[in-house]
Amino acid sequence: MRGRQVFMDSLLAHGVDRIFGNPGTTESPLLDSLKNYPGVEYVVTLHEGLAVGAASFYAQASGKTPVVNLHVAPGLGNAIGMIYGALKANSPMVVTAGQQDTRLRLREPVLSHDLVAMAAPVTKWSVQVERADEMAAIMQRAFKIANEAPAGPVFVALPINVMEQETDLPAAASTQIFANPRPEPAGIAAMVELLQAADNPAIVVSDDVARAGAHNELVALAEAMGAGVWFEAIRHHAAFPNRHPNARAILPVDAAAIARSLAGADLVMLIGGPFFEEVWFTPGEPFPTGATVVQIEQSAARLAYNYPLSAGLVGDLPSTLDALCAGLATAPAAYQTAAKARNAALATSSTEDEAAYQARSQRAWDRAPMSMPRAMAEISAGAPDNVVVVEEAITAGLDLARAFNFAAPGDYYSGRGGGIGQGLAGAIGAKLAHPDRPLLAISGDGSAMYSIQALWTAAHHKLDIVFVILVNREYRILKHNLDTYRQRFDANSNQDYPQMDLDTPALDFVTIAKGMGVPGSTISQPGDLAAAIKAAFATPGPRLIAVDIEGKR
């Protein structure tokens, strides 16, 4: 058999059902093999970054390990930013790139480079298959490393001649691996003791909870503790229901502001990790002075990685959170009473926060151009109840979270790592993972232009996605960040915002979408938006709606 057959057989052995790719000449062996593997769908994209972004969201939404097919050095280079996002998101995937014939190595053929070195900084493992006899072993190891906690992308370079070499070594995969660690009883006991001693506990939750399927166990633990649940500033999932009375807010992006948000907490429980992704430097730690800090992690490598702990526990998240709940169930009656009182106080605070938000929203309700709270409310009103939301609205994120009910993992996806352009790309992967649910992709106009080719892929594969582009004709997040920079560094504060406007010329998203086979419309009046969203969902295939909203000028 040839190396390419072993490669494709390895995908089947590891349950791969989709390859996301942007093909080229060195990928000919893979492409020519597809007809013999009808169970593996090739999702065609028009840019390598889009292929990786779609695969990353597919991995997150489906729980499967996709394969990405890139084209030699320039293709891998185009994809590096999205691979970085996948690494930050802990998305298990095998990224491949065709490599030139190894017999040409010393002649420096066209498009050649050291692919392994290029990919190494943004992957868990980077390797080139040098002989067909290595193919089965390398692919088996690639899938193993990609899925080990913390999960992430690996890279395999596939020289064209190696794919055509003969080998007697067939594809192989492990069939039964039980890798979820059970928490140590002594660790559970120690952590329960600390929880019972806390008068005002707080929980900070990561995406690990959603990926591990520990959503219900977290709700039970938060209620048993009487703890508010805070979210990372940049997150991929809805790890806790956003309308639960114990849900608090998204944490800021500097240590001092995080500590202020958690003020009053005498115990902070970190679930998953690592924490925190900061943008601005401030001295000190992101915890209230004197607070006990505990952490639960599935990987020992990330436990106590950034901060010292009073207790740290490695364990499978569902069973660990369940064990903590069981421990608290036997706590003294005084603790149970105090936890119920904290839950009641959190419910009151949640109601007051919602009323204050609605009051602020009403003051901006009739603005022209449309205000962000109004736009999000109208979009939510037109969307189906079971909609999946893929979001890269950035400055609209807080309003979106108020408008939609993200009750469980699978209701919401966003990008990790901070690189933009993930939203439209991610919508492709999320829709393929949720074929039976309506999908809404919401993106800012600046972010959309990073992966606008996703519209063609959606049309090509006939995906029912409603793309909403929020058009304020500016990089609004950069304007906010420039304000912060000027304040923090005492820089010029009365200048305009250089190179941050997108209005000369203005981007015509409806025309762009039409050119890629996606019908679209522009909505400027808020009263028309909900009906337009509803109509878009009622029509098969992808649709685009450009929404004119207020900016920060």
Image: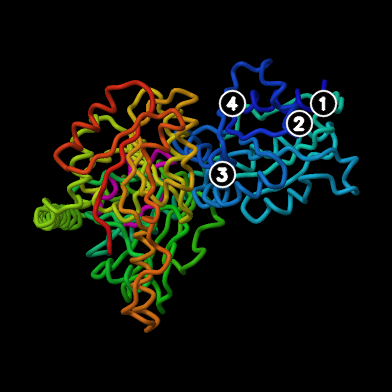
User: In the rendered image, is residue 333 in sight?
Assistant: no
Crowding at dot 1, Cα within 10 Å, few <14 / some 14-19 / many 20+, comes out as some
> Which of label 2 and label 3 is nearer to you?
3
Element on which disc 3 rests: helix
Determine contact: label 2, label 3, CB under 8 Å: no
Q: Position of residue 47 (x, y in %)?
A: 57, 40
Q: Which residue is mark 4?
A: 42
Q: Position of residue 224 (x, y in %)?
A: 24, 49
Q: Which mark is residue 49?
A: 3
Q: Name the one closer to the observer, 199 or 228.
A: 228
Range drawn in magenta: 203-225
- Residue occupying the point 28% across, 28% down: 536
Q: Which residue is mark 1?
A: 169
Mark nearer the N terminus (3 vs 4): 4
Q: Is residue 219 magenta?
A: yes
Element on which disc 2 rests: helix
Mark nearer the N terminus (4 vs 1): 4
Determine contact: label 1, label 2, CB under 8 Å: yes
- Residue 108 appears left or right of 90: right
Q: Which residue is mark 2?
A: 136
Determine contact: label 2, label 4, CB under 8 Å: no
